[in-house]
Structure formats: structure tokens, C-alpha cells
Amino acid sequence: MIDIVNAITLLANYIIVPSLAYGSQLALGALGITMVYAVLRFSNFAHGEIMSFGTMISIFMIWLIQSLGISIQPLPTALLALPFSIIATIILLLGLDKVVFRYYQNQRVQPVTFMIVSVGVMFFLAGLIRFFIGTSKKNFDDGERFIIKASEFKQITGLAEGLSIRTTQAITVIVTLLLVTYIFWFLNKTKTGKSMRAFSDNEDLALLSGIKPNQVIVITWVLVGILASVAGTLYGLDKGYKPFVYLQLVLPIFAAAIVGGVGNPLGAVLGGYIIAFSEAFITFAYKRFLTYLVPEEWAPQGLVQMLSTEYKFAVSFVLLVIVLLIKPTGLFRGRTL
Amino acid sequence: MTFFAGKDMYAGYGASMILNGCSISVDKGKIAVIVGPNGAGKSTAMKALFGMLPLKKGSVTIQGKDIVNLRPEQRVMLGMAYVPQTNNVFPSMTVLENLEMGAFVRFDDLSRTIAEIFELFPILKTKQEQAAGELSGGQRQQVAVARALMTQPKILMLDEPTAGVSPIVMDELFDRIIDIAKTGVAVIMVEQNAKQALQIADSGFVLVQGENKFTDTGAALLENSSVRQAFLGG
């Protein structure tokens, strides 16, 4: 019996808790991508760099706040910096919209052209970010590191396996929960949110109903700015900030959005967790887990790992291919908010 | 003076002209029906009246006031409403949300208008929490008309409201349209089912190649032997 509890604790420590945090970060990212897709009808490859930009601003603000001697121990200073990062990211997006995206919108270009434009924006932002903050890794998770340490957990429960929950993981999950709840409330209960869904559903009829496209587009970018800067900052807080990593992050985020049904917000959120959990479950070494559960003589010799962790991105792609082959619309039918 | 009129309208896409001096008019509480063969410019005339297609020549007036330079959304504010032939609901949104979006330009209390609409289309009341895209064709047309009514328009324009619905549903829709007209709304509609539509029409406009071929009361057009032969199948 105690072995089963140990096995479950092991899974919780190495898969469930980290995947909940990582899944939340992917979910927020995918939600941003899905909103751009649903309203503006293009795949925004610059989203990873937008997240990176938000994180960069957060770091600058953290440095500034720290130098002023302000702190909210035991919570990380990042929470104080977040509002500034959100505002800066929104300004960046509205600027990009005005200077770049709106031009192509008015030309009514093909979605493919739009996608290439977003790739251009991605490279531009990537360069800009490296110019300002450099390429080295920055850790900015000041504050209390653990809510519960593995050793403490062992002491309290008397189990052989420990369960550690880092503050950043808890913050990630809580902030995601709040933000996602807010976004869903906004889309489903407010007149402005409903008008966004209407616009995404049937653009021509939205115009006939007096819904102003400009207003919808601006609000979309505002929401995307909030989502992207929060997602980026939370990811950086949890795993450290390295501009180069955010370029790769676009891949699992897109996989999450597509697996869930691109354009569907609920799908994007679920997709984020699906990708995170599958990455963890497939790259986890089950040796210790099985040792707890099977008789001693059956205990595995090898690691019992399906795929080495370096290949975790492959998991999202395999999942993506499977979904596109079996259910091309994603889990939820997409295209609309 | 007629309440709402498009006079001698010339319009088209690019170089090709589709409307060649066509005139449509309707009074408050009356139903005007536009009929004609395929490609006669019926839907184009509607678009021109609503400002979705710029006129090359001619005028569109409400109570004698020229609105030809106004954009469609500005005409909505003046009390015009338009129901397109297809894609005329927000499919993923509930019936109630469709109604709310129809009233997007209004900032007052909608509950009375919604109650009136549910009285007119009782079936929508029972389906108000269902997504409009999941409804049957006839019900979806009702949602489309109801959405347009949410602005409490003075002029309601319907582009083939009975396209693709069964004859029974068609009769019901026509009854509802008569009810709407009785409340003082000017109704203009394009119809494929010319015979049935002219029966409820106060005035009928038979378009051929973008011109008025016949203009008369609905009853008179139904009696007219050349109209019957050419357009109503004898």
C-alpha cells in the first residue's frame, strides 16, 4: 500500500506538478495564438518573441524595482513588474498592428502572406530583444523558492519519495487560472467580448450589426498582449529566461493551439495541458515508478524511458501529426472564438 | 412622397453594369417584393439600397432625405436593417447572443424588444440558449430576421428569406413578415417564390436585366397575363 502512495508521489513530483505549470504556460501562449487566429485570421509566428519581449520588460522592471529596494517577499518581484510588462507589450502590439499588420489587413492579403509577415516580425523582434538584453540566461525568481521542499515532505509524511512544489509553479497555476477565467468571462459575458466572438463568427454580419472592426482588432491585441507577457514572464520565472528558448517555445504552443482546435479558446487551454502532460509522460523514466509497483524480482533493469528528454519537442510534433491525420479540426472545431 | 425609395439606380461591379436605372420604393407598413429571373440584379438592387454597393447614378432617400453617401453601418443608425441571403446568423453564438449582437448599436434596455421578438417567433424563446448554427434552416432564418429587428428598424430588407426552407415554413415566415409590416415597418424583400411572395406584397417590382419591367401592386402583377407567362409559370 505504502508503495502505491510512493509511486503516486513520484509521479506527482516529476510529472503532475511540473506539467501543470508548463501546461499553464503553454495554455496562455496557445490562447494568445488562437485569439489572433480567430479574429485576424492568421497564424502569428511572432507570438513566441512577443512573449520574450514581455519577459524582457519584466526583467528590466524587476532590476529597477530591486534597485529601489522594494520587495514583496516571499513572493517574487516579477509579480510587481508584470503590470508594466503587460502595458509595454500592449503598446508594442498596437504599434506593430499600426505599422505592419494593418497595412496587410487593408490589402486583404492571403493568410499565407500574413503568416510570412509574422515570421518577419518574429525575426525583427528576436533581433531587437537580443540587442537590448543579450543572449545569456537570466534568472529572476527572487523570493521564496519552495512552498514545500522534497525533504520537508518526506519528513512530514514519512514517505520514501518527496514532493516539492516551487513557488513559481504555484504562482504560474494560480495566475493562469485567474487570467483564463477572466478571458472566458470577458468573451462570454461582456458586450465587447461577445462582439469579438461575433466578428470571429461572421465578419460581414458583424459589420451589418454595427460592430466596428477596428475596435475588435484593438481589443484583440490588448488581450493578446496581456496573455503573451504573462505567459512569457511565468515561463521565465519558472525556468529562467533565455531569448533563444522562446523561439523554440512557439512550436509546442502552436501544437497546443492546433491540437485543441485553432481558434477555439477552450481547446487552446486544454491543448496546452495535453502537450505538457504528454511530453512529461513520454520522456519520464519509469524505472523507480515500476520498482514500487511490481514484485522485486520483476523490477526493470533499464530506465524504462520511451524517449530521452532531449526529444521532448518531438512529442508535440508527433501529437500534432496524429491530430491532423485523425481529427484535422482539433479536439474542438476551431476558426471561431 | 414615398417613405423609402431608390430612384433610377445604376450600379455594377467593375465595368459591367448590373442595375440599369432600376427604381424600388416602399411605404411604412407596406411590403415591397422584388422578383425576376436569375441574374436580373435583385440582390444587387438590395445591396445598392443598403449602401454595400456604390451607385454610379441615382438616389436613395428616406423621407426625401438623400442617404446615398452613407455607409451601411450609418444607414443602420438611421433605422435600416438588412438580412443577407446566406451566412445571416452568428453560428457559434446562442440565439439570445445573436439578438444581443443585432442590437450592438443600442445602449438602452433590450428586454422589451427581446420579449416582443419572442412573441413574434415563439420557437426562438425555447431555443434561446442553443447555438444558432445548430438550428434548422427555417429556425435559422427566424434568428436572422429577429437579429435584424433588434435595432427596431423602420425599414427591413430581406434577401430571399425563404431560400432553402420547406413550403410550410415558408408560409409561416411570410405570416411573420406580414406581422412585422403591420407594426409599421417598411419591408423590402427579394423572393424566388414569386407567386407566394406577390400574394402578400403591397407592391411588386419585376426586374429584368437591372431594369423595372413591371411595377404594380402585388395583386395586379399576379393578374397581369404577360407577367404570369414570363415569370410565374403561367
Image (spheres, coloured by chain):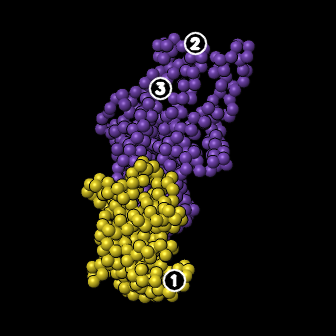
Is the C-beta separation of discs 2 and 1 under 8 Å?
A: no
In the displayed orientation, state which residue is furthest to the left. Answer: B108
Asked whether the viewer can see residue A137, the reply is no
Q: Colour of chain B?
A: yellow
Q: Residue at x 54, y 25 (%)?
A: A12
Asked whether the viewer can see residue A274, the reply is yes
CA neighbours of label 3 inside 10 A, class few (<14), some (14 to 19), many (20+): some
Along the line of sight, which residue is nearer the eye, A256 or A211?
Answer: A211
Q: Quadrant of residue B5?
A: bottom left
User: Looking at the image, is B5 positioned above or below residue A179?
Assistant: below
Is the C-beta separation of discs 2 and 3 under 8 Å?
A: no
State the residue position of label 1.
B228
Q: Amino acid at mark 2?
A: Ile
The CA span between labels 2 and 1 is 90 Å
Q: Secondary structure at mark 1?
A: helix
Q: Position of residue A9 (x, y in %)?
A: 55, 21
Q: Residue at x 63, y 48 (%)?
A: A327
| Tag shown at residue A2 | 2
Q: Amino acid at mark 3?
A: Ile
Is the C-beta separation of discs 1 and 3 under 8 Å?
A: no
Along the line of sight, which residue is nearer the eye, B22 or A55?
Answer: B22
State the residue position of label 3.
A165
Q: Position of residue B178 (x, y in %)?
A: 37, 68
Q: Chain of mark 1?
A: B
Q: Quadrant of residue A67?
A: top left
Q: Secondary structure at mark 3?
A: strand
Q: Chain of mark 3?
A: A
Q: Earlier in the sequence, mark 2 or mark 3?
A: 2
The CA span between labels 1 and 3 is 82 Å
- A35 relative to A248 in the view: left or right: left
